[in-house]
Image (cartoon, rainbow, N blue to C red):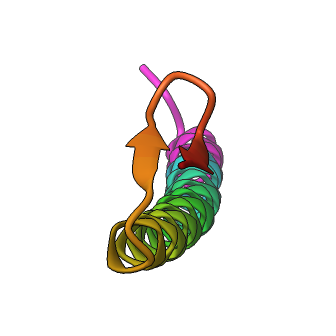
Amino acid sequence: MFGRGTWVKIGVGLAVLAGLAWSHTAAYRAGRTAEQARIVERITQENDDAAENAEDWRTEYRRCVASGGLYDFESGSCGP
């Protein structure tokens, strides 16, 4: 039904399609991996910032109590 040249063309066409599908999948995975790395980096930075803020608050609270003051949680200040 089909000649040898037709089958060669079909084979080449399928090989090109397979190559395009593979390259698209590889590019998609690389982009996804890069985005996941950025998300992890952002979460880590936010966690570090939260830990630093908590430590600053604990220091402020301890200083207030050590000086005999009463810490006002609503206003975030140390009162007499």
Query: What secondary structure is the magenta-colored segment mainly?
Result: helix
Q: Position of residue 14 (x, y in %)?
A: 52, 45
Q: Residue at x 46, y 78 (%)?
A: 63
**Number of numbered callouts drawn:** 0
Q: Is residue 31 above or below residue 63?
A: above
Towards the viewer: 10 or 2: 10
Residue at image position (44%, 32%) is 73
In the image, 6 versus 14, the foreground residue is 14
Residue found at x 49% / y 28%: 2
Whether residue 9 is in magenta: the answer is yes
Q: Name above or below for residue 32 compared with residue 55.
A: above
Judge by depth and name the residue closer to the eye, 56 or 5. Answer: 56
Where residue 74 appears, as percent x and y from the top left, is: 52, 22
Between 3 and 57, the one nearer to me in the picture: 57
Relative side of 39 to 31, left or right: left
Report the quarter where the N terminus lies: top left
Residue 30: % across, % down:
57, 67
Residue at image coords 53%, 73%: 56
Q: Give the residues drawn in magenta, as a range.
A: 1-14
- Residue 2 horizontal side relative to residue 62, left or right: right
Residue 61 sits inside the magenta stretch:
no
Q: Position of residue 3 (x, y in %)?
A: 53, 38
